[in-house]
Image (cartoon, helix red, strand yellow):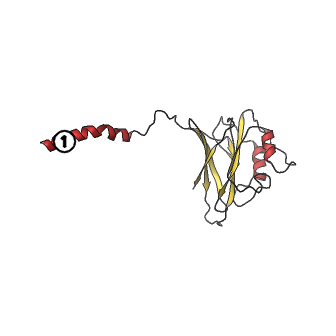
Amino acid sequence: MKANIFAFLTALLLLPVMFAGCNNANDDELPEDKILPVLSNGKIETGGDGVLANEELTAFFEKYLPTLSGSQSECFFVGDKENKCLIINSADELRKIISSSSVELPTIDFGSYTLVMGQHMIDGTAYRVVTQEIAVNSDKKELTLSVKKPDGTYTVICPVYYWGLYPKLTQEAIGVNLIIL
């Protein structure tokens, strides 16, 4: 009888602990919001307000920012071997990061949009970014890049470049999360 009472009392004491472990939601955390680019790496996205592709912008990045890892950009991140994510909110900011002054900039409505671009060092050639999105939490923004791994690749550290035109973002740092598919 004493054993049954002891087991019953122990179970009663452990009940709150067991149910507390099952609750994954934190009332203090805001849910993540996703921001999709309206245009990125030459691909029209359905995010933002559904703006149609800007052919001039797409052509500019096709020319100056290679889509496959292993190729070097002649205009952006020249000689840079670090991961970089840039938030660009004006034509002046874009002009400052181009290594050649003779390059004609594309027309971008920086009043409505922010250009997010960068490079992420990866351990192989022929990788390419297939999707990207920005997750917004209460205290930070994080860009998630989904990168397609090729069937055959050379093992060498090289950059995979990315760019995306997003609805207007404030000037703040964005973390980068890379997912290899």
Q: Is residue 20 visible?
A: yes
Q: Residue at x 70, y 61 (%)?
A: 70
Picture coordinates of residue 18, whole percent (x, y) = 32, 41
In the rendered view, does 22 fall on the left or right side of 109? left
Picture coordinates of residue 108, whole percent (x, y) = 77, 38
Helix, strand or loop at label 1? It is helix
Count the numbered circles shown.
Answer: 1
Q: Nearer the viewer, residue 92 or 58?
A: 92
Residue furthest left in the image? 1
Count residues near mark 1 (Cα–Cα under 10 Å), then give few for <14, some for 14-19, many for 20+: few
Picture coordinates of residue 113, whole percent (x, y) = 71, 36
Q: Nearer the viewer, residue 94 or 83?
A: 83
Specify the quadrant that holds the N terminus.
top left
| Amino acid bearing label 1 | Phe
| 73 w.r.t. 137: above or below | below
| 36 w.r.t. 62: above or below | above
Specify the quadrant that holds the C terminus.
bottom right
In the rendered view, does 85 fall on the left or right side of 30? right
Picture coordinates of residue 147, whole percent (x, y) = 61, 54
Quarter where residue 107 is shown = top right
Q: Is residue 162 visible?
A: no
Quarter where residue 39 is shown = top right
In the rendered view, does 102 fall on the left or right side of 90? right
What residue is shown with label 1? 6
Residue furthest right in the image? 102
